[in-house]
Image: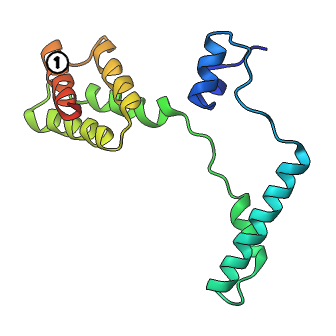
Amino acid sequence: GNCTLSQLDCLPFEVQLQIANSDNTTVAKKPSRSTVARQITTTSSEVIDLVEAIHPGFDDEDIVGEELQEEPPSNFFKDNVAPLKDFILSNQDPDAEVVETVKEFLIVCVGERRLDDVVVFLRAIRNMSVGWNDELYRDLRDSVVGEIY
């Protein structure tokens, strides 16, 4: 059936390619539910045994409580792109220090191997109708490219 881009983004790269190419080949044999349940039970009991060996008297309920806490889904644009755009809009005529701050941010992202995010950030900067001029954009882009290569 149909799937959204966010659902597609969560899948392994090979599966994304299959969907994009309408390839109906099965990637791998799917294990039965009983096999999966057995693996989970075995893994959980092994983890509990290991924790008890390291921390005698550690309560099983502590582990269950930690497993149930999941981080809420994040909105990449709201959490990342919007603050960057706001920063640029609040510094319409930036001095060298402001430009250096954005460069350092992008270089940190490169260092964390977040290249897809860097591309999104650079596109957002480039496509802002009331953003920085082309010369500043090229300077940022060239700094990032220099950091990658």
Between 25 and 93, the one lying in front of the other is 25
* Relative height, residue 12 to residue 141 (above, below): below
* Relative height, residue 55 to residue 7 (above, below): below
Between 47 and 131, the one lying in front of the other is 47
Q: What is the secondary structure assignment of the residue under circle 1? A: helix
Q: Quadrant of residue 117?
A: top left
**Residue 113 percent location from the top left of the image:** 36, 39
Give the residue at the far bottom of this rendering: 56
Q: Is residue 64 left or right of residue 123?
A: right
Give the residue at the far left of this rendering: 96
**Residue 104 percent location from the top left of the image:** 21, 40
Q: Quadrant of residue 22?
A: top right
Q: Is residue 14 left or right of residue 113?
A: right
Type of residue at label 1? Answer: Arg
- Identify the residue position indicated by label 1 in the image: 138
Label 1: how many Cα within 10 Å (few below 14, some 14–19, many 20+)? few
Q: Is residue 107 left or right of residue 9?
A: left
**Residue 87 percent location from the top left of the image:** 29, 33
Quadrant in the picture for the C terminus: top left
Q: Residue at x 56, y 39 (%)?
A: 74
Between 86 and 31, the one lying in front of the other is 31
Q: Residue at x 34, y 18 (%)?
A: 123
* Relative height, residue 18 to residue 57 (above, below): above
Q: Quadrant of residue 50?
A: bottom right
Quadrant in the picture for the N terminus: top right
